[in-house]
Image: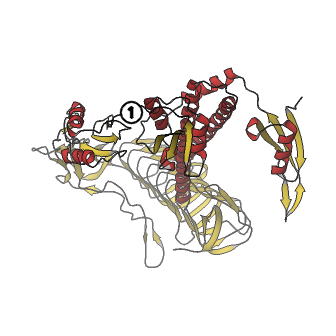
């Protein structure tokens, strides 16, 4: 009685498998091999043996048929393009010849359909499989001698679902009649009503261009009209980068972040939409087009529309901006002293200017920009625009600056900052700073020490850390949406590999039954369909792998963020770029820290 399972140990994996097959008295496709322990070599010397388990596969007919049905439900239903083989009837049997092997492997169902049309009997599916898998170009005897059934030439019309075009292909006669031009056009006109190239069709038939799919008709796509649009006559984005003065210092006071307008100024112009043009399918169906969408001005406070309806005009002097899609001219709320008990918390739908300080415990919430000439203490400031502190913030671990734009401050200490754009300052000390743009620490000090600074793009400073090895974390990262896409593609690849593994096991079992004569003609046809299904999943797997490579390249590109150190970076600093981490162990001067070849590197300082 033969064994069902053996466990073997040795240095060579292939030798162990051969030994196991002999002990089980089985062929390779009748067993499952599991590697229990992987062998290792060191400088060509084996230091650890392989340990494997070889098990005999056992599946009854019900299991095979169940797996078969599951796999066929997964099959791609796309039509076949052309034929890439020939079948000849000779005195000693029926022979299959593969003309284009690569194309044939992707279209194996065509040979089955042709066999059915010709009513070939006693087909040997095993030989067909041999033809598919063989690298030789030769004739394969797939059936015994029999009388050939003659078939007339045919014309196939292929019109995609949207009927935007039409293709035809000619199937050559198999002992029957050739196709006449008249009969071809009679069939074509039943389906193609527009855009037919008559000369192309005639040439195909006269020149007998068989087994070639050719475009013979094209419809006209509808052309949609252009949408109307609005042209804004003021900057819709703000440039928050400070100017560098002649003495090398940075001007944090005059950033020109407010776009001022005068009463009567034209703020925007309206352009009207255009009409679309209808299309038509090759089946003669008219395709409606869309006229361009009409747009309307959306405007609010201190803005009016001109008499002709084509312009927006400012009613007052002030700051023009777009808020919630509306053009408005904001008034400015100004506090000449401190934000304290005399003012309470401030909530305003425009720009806020504070001449004094903002004391601990108070809040400012503005739909526009916030400009503060004094010091911000442990206060919370939130802005839908930019925050500009002409001095800075001493937050006492309570101060918070939250901006939908940029944050500019003389210094930042013991505070939390979050900006959708850049953070620009002279010093950051023991603070948590997050920027969806860049963190630029310039000016005379240019210091980052303690806390955490995270930027989407880059971090620039003169000095990072301290001689006391103060724990400081700097990070430039990757768009989280790409991470999600990467995980989804990896999941699809794993699923495709699992489906291919199931298909391979089913094909193996069906072939084993075929050897013993246990397959009916219907099941032989099923086997061929499963083989075609496998090619579909192999192609899907290849596409997913290409997509994975593309996403990984995007991540690689987006992790080109850099940390630039003009003067010195000290030990105690932790650097994170993308998925890589580096701890600074030694003092480094004038350097740029970047990610390359999936590792963090240190290069010379870049301006």
Q: Nearer the viewer, residue 355 or 352?
A: 352
Residue lying farthest to the front in this orientation: 91
Q: Check the image and name the residue furthest to the left.
A: 308
The residue carrying pointer 1 sits among few (fewer than 14), some (14 to 19) or many (20 or more) residues within 10 Å by Cα, namely few
> Measuring 50% from the left and 47% from the top, which residue is drawn there?
98
Where residue 275 appears, as percent x and y from the top left, is: 15, 41
Q: Is residue 485 visible?
A: no
| Residue situated in front as seen by the camera: 83 or 394 | 83
Residue 323 left/right relative to 426: left
157 lies above or below 369: above
How far across and how far down the image is residue 132, in percent? 57, 44
Above or below, 365 relative to 389: above
Q: Is residue 322 left or right of residue 97?
A: left
Residue nearest the viewer, comparing 193 with 542: 193
Q: Please state the horizontal and vertical placement of residue 348, each as a whole percent of the image.
A: 38, 42
Residue 158: x and y in percent read 33, 37
To which residue does mark 1 refer? 150
């Amino acid at each position: 009685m033969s064994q069902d399972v053996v466990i073997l140990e040795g240095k060579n994996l292939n030798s162990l498998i051969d030994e196991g097959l002999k002990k089980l008295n089985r062929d390779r496709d009748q067993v499952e091999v599991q590697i229990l322990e992987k062998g290792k070599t060191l400088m060509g010397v084996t230091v650890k043996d392989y340990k494997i388990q070889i098990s005999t596969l056992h599946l009854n007919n019900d299991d095979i048929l169940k797996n078969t049905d599951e796999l066929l439900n997964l099959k791609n239903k796309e039509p076949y393009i052309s034929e890439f083989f020939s079948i000849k009837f000779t005195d000693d049997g029926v022979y299959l010849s593969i003309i284009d092997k690569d194309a044939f492997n992707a279209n194996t169902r065509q040979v089955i359909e042709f066999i059915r049309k010709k009513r070939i009997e006693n087909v040997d599916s095993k030989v067909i499989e041999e033809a598919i898998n063989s690298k030789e170009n030769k004739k394969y005897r797939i059936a015994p001698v029999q009388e050939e059934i003659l078939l007339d030439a045919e014309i196939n019309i292929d019109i995609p679902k949207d009927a935007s075009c039409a293709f035809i292909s000619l199937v050559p006669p198999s002992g029957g009649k050739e196709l006449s031009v008249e009969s071809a056009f009679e069939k074509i006109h039943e389906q193609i009503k527009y855009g037919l190239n008559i000369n192309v069709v005639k040439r195909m038939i006269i020149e007998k261009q068989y087994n070639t799919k050719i475009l013979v008709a094209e419809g006209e796509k509808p052309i949609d009209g252009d949408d109307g649009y609005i042209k804004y006559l003021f900057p819709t984005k703000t440039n928050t980068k400070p100017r560098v003065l002649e003495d090398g210092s940075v001007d944090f006071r005059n950033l020109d972040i407010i776009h001022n307008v005068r009463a009567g100024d034209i703020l925007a112009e309206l352009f009207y939409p255009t009409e679309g043009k209808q299309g038509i399918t090759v089946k003669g169906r008219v395709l409606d087009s869309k006229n361009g969408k009409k747009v309307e001005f959306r405007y609010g406070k201190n803005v009016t529309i001109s008499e002709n309806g084509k312009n927006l005009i400012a009613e007052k002097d002030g700051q023009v901006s777009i808020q919630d899609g509306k053009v408005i001219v904001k008034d400015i709320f100004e506090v000449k002293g401190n934000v304290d008990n005399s003012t309470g918390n401030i909530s305003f739908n425009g720009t806020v200017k504070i001449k004094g300080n903002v004391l601990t415990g108070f809040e400012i919430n503005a739909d526009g920009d916030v400009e503060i000439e004094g010091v911000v203490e442990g206060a919370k400031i939130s802005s839908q625009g930019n925050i500009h502190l002409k001095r800075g913030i001493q937050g006492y671990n309570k101060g918070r600056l939250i901006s939908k734009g940029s944050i500019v401050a003389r210094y930042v200490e013991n505070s939390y900052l979050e900006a959708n754009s850049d953070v620009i300052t002279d010093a950051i000390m023991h603070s948590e700073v997050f920027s969806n743009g860049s963190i630029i620490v310039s000016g005379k000090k240019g210091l980052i020490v303690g806390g955490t600074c995270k930027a989407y793009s880059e971090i620039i400073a003169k000095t990072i850390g301290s001689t006391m090895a103060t724990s400081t974390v700097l990070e430039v990262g990757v768009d989280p949406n790409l991470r999600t896409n990467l995980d989804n593609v990896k999941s699809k690849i794993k699923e495709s590999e699992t489906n291919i593994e199931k298909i391979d096991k089913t094909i193996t079992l069906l072939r084993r039954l075929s050897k013993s004569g246990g397959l009916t003609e219907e099941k032989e046809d099923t086997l061929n369909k499963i083989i075609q299904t496998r090619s579909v999943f192999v192609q899907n797997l290849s596409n997913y792998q290409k997509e994975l490579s593309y996403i990984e390249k995007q991540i690689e590109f987006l992790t080109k963020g850099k940390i630039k150190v003009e003067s010195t970076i000290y030990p105690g600093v932790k650097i994170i770029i993308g998925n890589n981490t580096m701890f600074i162990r030694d003092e480094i001067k004038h350097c740029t820290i970047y990610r390359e070849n999936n590792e963090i590197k240190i290069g010379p300082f870049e301006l």
